C-alpha cells in the first residue's frame, strides 16, 4: 500500500459509555485504521469503560453498543472487557458481543502489536 507501514494495533478504552463522544471517537479511529490497512488485535475496555459491556444494555446505550458489536463481527476483532474491574463494579452479566478477560489478555495483545492507543 504505497510503501506505508501497516501496523497491528491494540486499543484501550477507559471512559464510561456515558461519555459517548469518547467511545464514538475510538470507534471512528478503529474503522479508519481498518480501512487504511491496519489490523487491530483487540479493543480492551478498562476502568470506567467496562460498563460498555453491561447486560442488559441500558436503552440509551443500545445503538452505540450495537455499532461496536457490528464492527467487531465484521472485522473479527474481539471486544475484551476487564473482568476484574467489572467484578469490582458489581457487573455479573456481560453483553454477548464482549468477552471477559484479564490484564493478561491485554498484555498479550500489546506484546503482539506494533502500537497501543488509549481513548
Image (tube, grey):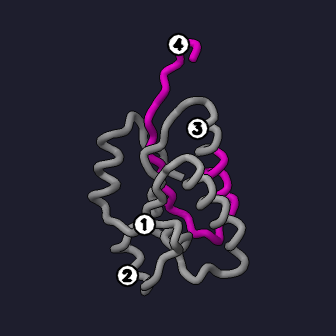
Say whether marks 4 and 1 touch (CB < 8 Å): no
Residue 9 in the magenta stretch? The answer is: yes
Give the secondary structure at mark 2. Answer: helix
- For marks 4 and 1, give the one nearer the viewer: 1
Q: Quadrant of the N terminus?
A: top right
Q: Position of residue 52 (x, y in %)?
A: 56, 70
Q: Position of residue 118 (x, y in %)?
A: 49, 50
Say whether marks 4 and 2 touch (CB < 8 Å): no
Residue range in magenta is 1-28
- For marks 1 and 2, give the one nearer the viewer: 1
Q: What residue does disc 1 label? A: 99
Give the secondary structure at mark 3. Answer: helix
Q: What residue does disc 3 label? A: 34
Q: Nearer the viewer, residue 15 or 44?
A: 44
Q: Residue at x 56, y 55 (%)?
A: 73
Residue 97 in the magenta stretch? The answer is: no
> For the residue carrying disc 4, how many other residues have a C-alpha within 10 Å: few (<14), some (14-19), or many (20+)?
few
Q: Residue at x 48, y 43 (%)?
A: 40
- For marks 2 and 3, give the one nearer the viewer: 3
Q: From the viewer's perspective, is 103 left or right of 81?
A: left
> For the residue carrying disc 2, how many other residues have a C-alpha within 10 Å: few (<14), some (14-19), or many (20+)?
few
Q: From the viewer's perspective, is 30 left or right of 87?
A: right
| Residue 7 drawn above or below residue 60 | above
- Tag of residue 88: 2
- First of labels 2, 3 by sequence position: 3
Q: Residue at x 58, y 38 (%)?
A: 34
C-alpha separation, residue under disc 2 versus residue under disc 3: 33 Å
Q: Residue at x 37, y 72 (%)?
A: 83
- For marks 4 and 2, give the one nearer the viewer: 4
C-alpha separation, residue under disc 4 versus residue under disc 1: 35 Å
- Tag of residue 3: 4
Amino acid at each position: 500500500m504505497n510503501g506505508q507501514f501497516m501496523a497491528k494495533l491494540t486499543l484501550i478504552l477507559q471512559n464510561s459509555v456515558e461519555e459517548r463522544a469518547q467511545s464514538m471517537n475510538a470507534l471512528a479511529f478503529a474503522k479508519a485504521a481498518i480501512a487504511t490497512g491496519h489490523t487491530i488485535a483487540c479493543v480492551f475496555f478498562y476502568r470506567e469503560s467496562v460498563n460498555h459491556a453491561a447486560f442488559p444494555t441500558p436503552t440509551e446505550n443500545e445503538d452505540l453498543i450495537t455499532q461496536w458489536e457490528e464492527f467487531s463481527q465484521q472485522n473479527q476483532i474481539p471486544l475484551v472487557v476487564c473482568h476484574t474491574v467489572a467484578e469490582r463494579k458489581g457487573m455479573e452479566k456481560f453483553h454477548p458481543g464482549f468477552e471477559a478477560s484479564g490484564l493478561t489478555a491485554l498484555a498479550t495483545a500489546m506484546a503482539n502489536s506494533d502500537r497501543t492507543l488509549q481513548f
